Amino acid sequence: MTTAPIQAGPTSGEWDAPAGAGAAGAPGRGPLLFLIGSALVWLVVSGVFALIASIQLHTPGFLSDCPILTHGRVRVLQETAFVYGWLGTAGPALAVWILGRLSGSPLRGTSWLGVGAAFWNAGLALGLVGIAIGDGTGTALFGLPAYVHPVMLASYAAIAIAGVLAWTGRRRGPMFAAQWYAAAALFLFPWLFSAADIMLVLAPVRGVLQAVVAGWFAQGLWTLWMAPLALAGAYYVVPRLTGKTLPNYDAASLGFWCLVFVGGWTGGRHLIGGPVPAWISTLAVVTTAMLVFHYVVVALNLRPALGAGSVLRFIAFGVGSYVLGGFVDAVTAARSVAVSTQFTTFDQAQQQLALYGGVSMLLYGTLYFAIPRIAGRAWSSADLLRGHFALAATGIALLVVSLGAAGLSQGRDLADPSVSFAAMATHMQVWLLVATGAQAILLLGNLLLAVNFLETAVLKPGSGEGVAS
Amino acid sequence: MSSPSQPDPRFEKAKLGDDELLVAHEKALGPKPDERARYRLAPLMMLFAMAGVILFAATYLNRYSGRFDRSVYDETALPNAGGAAEAKVDPAVAGKRLFGTPGACVTCHQATGEGIPGVYPPLAGSEWATGSEERVIRIVLFGLKGPVRVRGTDFPGTAAMPAFGASGFAWSDEKIAAVLTYVRQEWGNKAAAVTPQQVHKIRQSVGERKEWTQDELLTVK
């Protein structure tokens, strides 16, 4: 319908020149590459923790005499390194870059970007050490110790400045979908994080309300920060690589507002059957179902990603997982289903589908598109890139399926009082072993990406063929 | 789905520049010429889908929200009319629980309500328990001492019935009404329920006193 090809413009290469500057002196290149590089380090670190945590599920004695590496802490370390280190470092960097590209002018505020990047990483490193020695807050997706919260907030603000300046100073008034998502993510994180900080750490609310706030935060971090960061990349890369206007683009804004307004209310579905007033869970069930509308719009808009091309393959996989995850959420939020999937590894399967299959894959795709344009040179190896996709896709599929199967078996066993805990563990054993294999595959894939990045952007910067002529 | 000429993955050329992208999508949103007078279905279907979702949401919320009352934890329940947080309890259930509280009635009168011959008189079929509320409320509020005749048997009064209205137990009007309602309707007893108001009135009018005797009680109504 609306997919009429655009008349070919000037040669593509020309369009890829960093706007308004020669490739060598592209403003913000250093800080952006530093942010993305550090994000990859955190990605690998979290992969190692994920492997340890996964092994501990079927071999509980593994490394457990070391207090720093007990299962509880490893899980939080993995989650924090993944969410704040990988998604939360690469995501904002790419959002800033996209806002810069679409503003039509060189990035401004890049020294703030550098300072923010340095402190964000320092705070995160300190925070992970804090979690390891037992200072974590104990709240899901909010594990960082209270004392690094101010650093994280301030450094995030410094990183976001460049994005906000690019957004407000854009040449063209009307915005494109990628800009809405990127700007929303930049603005919403400080709000979420500081609100959670006040209600859970500084002046903690009491009793059941804490669970409600924690649920709201975890869900908000997902729908209002991680998902928009990933979507910003996808909405930007897909039309650029396919050369076509996004189909059903007139629904895109509805999809966006649906996510922003409805998404924040969906947290309570994790409290179904818990000691909270019924309306909190009910509202969550309803809003989770309404969110399906958002997922449908995203699927319609981004369906051209199914075309050829190695970069688009990441995005297509990401969109598929993202949308599938949304539908699974809606189904499992229904009370009758939730009672048997809640509190099992099925929850984890859903989380991995969303965070790894959805957000991570979309960010990988955006990254593969962006790095050559930021660094000014092509990726050093096409094989590493293809290998990464194969490993990531296999790893994610295995991980989600095995955790989901283990969760269903666990849910059945939990509901049957005649099944002993030992029997339940043996039923899950096989699937948990598969999950460990999947984590190993994912770690390997991420190492390929890290090596490729190292060779492309760090070891031989400026040499080799330029791409942004 | 590989196209004949796979682009080099190391650097995939963009087919659309930044500015082209903005312009193209801006145009996609703008008013479109009604090509060949065909109405575009997609937006209309979107609208229907959205309306359907909102209808579902409203119905579901209306059914399972417990009227947004913060005291309703069960999604199928509704708050009390008037929205008071206090839940209605069945006095017979509460009374049974009170009766069975360790140290309370069950210790002496037994779960069967038959008491212990010669020491603790029965409550089942007792003319005191099922008789005038005025008397039985007084017994439980202030206690009973001395000889007493129950179901045609004389109890010598070697043991005394403790006061539940004051000191030690200090049960509220509601608790006493509940336990008496239970006693008066259990073990085949079929007497009227006792209300907290009745207990309250007697508590007020009698004030403070020691245990009753059978003779004193017989003068009450």
Image (tube, coloured by chain):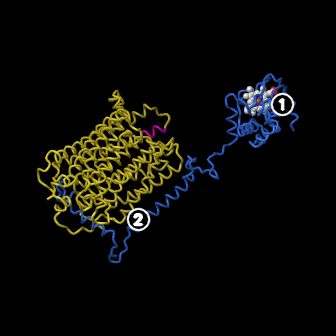
Main secondary structure type of the part rendered in magenta: helix
Residue at figure coordinates x 46%, y 64% from the top left: B51
The residue that label 1 is drawn on is B151
Q: Is residue A158 magenta?
A: no
**How crowded is the residue under tag 2: few (<14 C-alpha within 10 Å), some, or many (20+)?**
some
Where does residue A29 sit, x and y in percent of width and height?
A: 21, 52
Which of marks 2 and 1 precedes in the sequence? 2
**Chain to which mark 1 belongs:** B
Where does residue A256 sit, x and y in percent of width and height?
A: 37, 59
Please say whether residue B109 is visible from this viewpoint: no
**Rendering colour (chain A):** yellow
**Chain to which mark 2 belongs:** B
Q: Which residues are magenta?
A: A409-415
Q: Confirm whether circles 1 and 2 share one chain.
A: yes
Q: Number of labelled discs?
A: 2
Q: In the picture, which chain is blue?
A: B
Residue at figure coordinates x 40%, y 56% from the top left: A260
Q: Nearer the viewer, residue A247 or A45?
A: A45
Q: Quadrant of residue B215?
A: top right
The residue that label 2 is drawn on is B46
